[in-house]
Amino acid sequence: MPLSREDVEHIALLARLHLTEDEKERFRQQLSNIIDHISKLQELDTGAVQPMTSVVVEQSRLREDKAGPAMPREDLLSDAPEVVDEQFRVPPVLDGAP
Amino acid sequence: MKDLQKRPEGLVPLTVTQALKGLRAGDFSSRELTAAYLARIEKHNGRLNAYLHVAAEAALKAAAKADKQLVKGRRTKAKLPALLGLPIAVKDVLTVAGMPATSGSRILEGFVPTYNATSVQRLLDAGVVILGKTNTDEFAMGSSTENSAYGVVRNPWDEERVPGGSSGGSAAAVAAGLAPVALGTDTGGSVRQPAALCGLTGLKTTYGRVSRYGLIAFGSSLDTVGVLAHTAEDAAAMLNVMAGFDPRDATTLESAAPKIKLAKRMELKGLKIGVPKEYFIEGLQPEVEQAVRVAIAQLEELGASTREVSLPHTEYALPVYYIIAPAEASANLARFDGVRYGLRVPQDNLFDMFTHTRGQGFGPEVKRRIMIGTYALSAGYYEAYYGQAQKVRTLIRRDFEQAFEKVDLIAAPATPNSAFRIGAHTGNPLEMYLEDVFTLPANLAGVPGLSLPAGFDSQQLPLSLQLLGPHFSEERLLQVGHAYQQATAWHKARPERLEAPHA
């Protein structure tokens, strides 16, 4: 089933990706081909099969919930695009959201 | 040293084993060795683009420190760290404190992590010297390193061809003698496939063997840390240092760190090798098939017995992978939003800042995979795609479990063809995905794999044999690889064309 342009726009919105008009058309075609290919899985009857939810062979266990040393705040803030008063600065949150 | 005067780059390239032996004996210092590799990087990296970041100054400083320990160790006979003074390269998806980490993406431009990946930390504790960070497909998504935002990597065997990917920078660096060994990561073949295309030994570890802390996540149920080396012996030396439980990666296991010791001479008598009929398909380059068959015959000569096995769900590995990996990627890559690190494209409001940062920061393949993953996880499609893929993944793992009830190892091609030309698949993502058709199943099942140099095609391009084993069978894989390399010389070949004068 080929994707429509609206499908691509909807997926891009969910994925928080701004696409150019060219990209929308190119991805529409490419994603349609890929989805067509992965739809091959529908031909298998998996009614009796459990989904694989863990790759580790042994049972994984929980660690102790214990506070440990954290990375220094100034180190982590040193990589931020914009910092104010030891905090990440971002543009207004409430304007313009769809 | 005599050799140092003979050629400007001195005594390199070397294997890990040769380098460690020379360092211990005092034949050369770590500083000389490191300087020799840096000289080769200077000479060849401009064309190959294998390294994104060369840490020359830090490397020479670390080497000088290692030399002090080496000198003292020779005097006092004290036990020295296992890899003391050994230069290595690190794929740029793993963090090294103080060195840029880009993951091959513009969205991480300028990001300098403040901590070491656990795998890197353990190697540093064992005394390695880090030469730099190697090029990769963006977020390790690709099979050619053409998806790097920082330019394509060239294959040292033929510079018009790709080195494979996504660990293409690491593969090209080791193949060209710009490092004796390099770290890579393997989510769908990203160690084994470039190793195959560059004539190297590539180890994909069992899921749970090596900590992924500090690995910039792509597909969390598939990502593994591995090694690109000249020999199985070299890969074992690296694995011994890195393996084992890490409280920072809950998937690592306490039992994951036995020290592997390879026997000098090993008969393969009693070893049962399975040859999966589903891996010898139409479209397989005849020379690849022939090389694999010859290699299998060689293993038989060493005493192994072979039989055909079936992995019936092999043809579904590609669609399963291209649902699960993008689904996990779409979640993992949600963190790149321009807030805490890397690129920010300024906009008037937060939402537009997110979408424009991501729209400009990610390249086309990453966007494609984020969108496939988002689609496969979205309301109305989740069961049909992601749910079904998880079930078929069970069937693929069961295929391996059933095969390993009958045989000790599986031998197969690593790739459908030798290194392809730059640009050959760039217009068609699905064609590129097919390059990984023989490596994806191991990641879905979580089992380890090893690609081994196994000859050359008529274009003088390397060919490869892939061995796959049950969970945590790295010792067996490396032992068989080592036995094979005692009996063959393919792993000793070096790309002579690289040394020819370039215009």
Image (spheres, coloured by chain):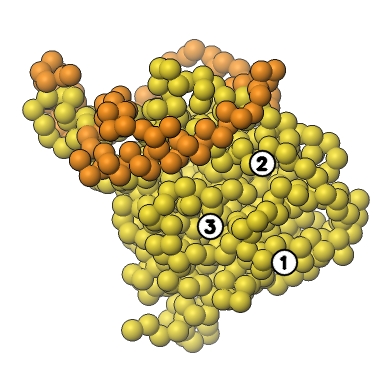
| Quadrant including the C terminus of chain B | bottom left
Q: Secondary structure at mark 2?
A: helix
Q: Which mark is residue B476?
A: none
Q: Which residue is mark 2?
A: B314
Q: Position of residue B176 (x, y in %)?
A: 49, 70
Instruction: Report which quarter residue B77 is drawn in.
Output: bottom right
- Are discs 2 and 1 both within one chain? yes
Q: Is residue B360 left or right of residue B181?
A: left
In terms of depth relative to the viewer, which is nearer, B127 or B260? B260
Q: Which mark is residue B194?
A: 3
Q: Position of residue B282 (x, y in %)?
A: 65, 56
Residue found at x 73% / y 44%: B469
- Are discs 3 and 1 both within one chain? yes
Q: Position of residue B11 (x, y in %)?
A: 52, 76
Q: Chain of mark 2?
A: B
Q: Chain of mark 3?
A: B
Nearer to us: label 3 or label 1 = 1
Residue found at x 75% / y 48%: B276
Q: Which mark is residue B290?
A: 1
Q: How many marks?
A: 3
A57 lies above or below B364? above
- Tell me, yes or no, if residue B450 can be seen here: yes
**Judging from the image, what is the letter of the chain drawn in yellow?**
B
What amino acid type should be assigned to the residue bearing mark 3?
Pro
What amino acid type should be assigned to the residue bearing mark 2?
Thr
Q: Secondary structure at mark 3?
A: helix
Q: Is residue B142 left or right of residue B222?
A: left
Q: What is chain A's hue in the picture?
A: orange
Q: Residues within 10 Å of mark 2 (few under 14, many from 20)?
A: some
What amino acid type should be assigned to the residue bearing mark 1?
Gln
In terms of depth relative to the viewer, which is nearer, B241 or B147? B147
CA distance for labels 3 and 1: 20 Å
